[in-house]
Image: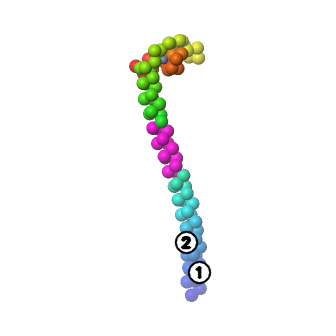
Amino acid sequence: MASTTETLDDYQVVNGDSSECDVIKLKITTEWQKIRVSENQINISNNEIIKLQKQLYRTCEHNFKRDSSAMSDDLFKYKCTKCSLYKNHYN
Ligand SMILES: [Zn+2]
């Protein structure tokens, strides 16, 4: 009978731990889900920004000036003073 009691005690301890572990695991899963939702929102916003920059590039009457911060081998040496986009970036 002692072994049965031990087993029951063990079961209760394990069950208690497991239930607490389940709560913690659920909290972790919830936080991961928040990260995934946030990452998805970042992707949506990034795509929206690119779309808007393309639209801005087509709409702006550019005034390109050489970008003083650009390196000599930089592909995008000219930046618009009005829209801050680089020349030919969206061509
Ligand atoms: Zn411009």
What stretch of residues is rendered in magenta?
A: 32-44
Q: Residue at x 52, y 20 (%)?
A: 84
Q: Residue at x 57, y 87 (%)?
A: 1
Report the front residue among 76 and 54.
54
**Cα separation between marks 2 and 1:** 14 Å
- Mark 2 highlights which residue? 15
Vertical comparison of 34 with 19: above or below: above
Residue 27 in the figure: left or right of residue 90: right
Report the front residue among 73 and 46.
46
Can you give x and y, in whole percent of width and height, for residue 27 in the image?
55, 57
Can you give x and y, in whole percent of width and height, for residue 63 in the image?
50, 12
Q: Nearer the viewer, mark 2 or mark 1?
A: 2
Residue 37 visible in the displayed image: yes
Disc 1 C-beta below 8 A from ligand 1: no
Q: Amino acid at mark 2?
A: Asn
Residue 75 visible in the displayed image: no
Vertical comparison of 28 with 15: above or below: above
- Mark 1 highlights which residue? 6
**For numbered disc 1, what is the local secondary structure?**
helix
User: Upstream in the sequence, badge 2 or badge 1?
Assistant: 1
Examine the structure image and report whether residue 11 is included in the region drawn in magenta: no
Q: Which residue in the rendered view is the most extreme toward the left?
A: 91
Vertical comparison of 22 with 74: above or below: below
Q: Residues within 10 Å of mark 2 (few under 14, many from 20)?
A: few
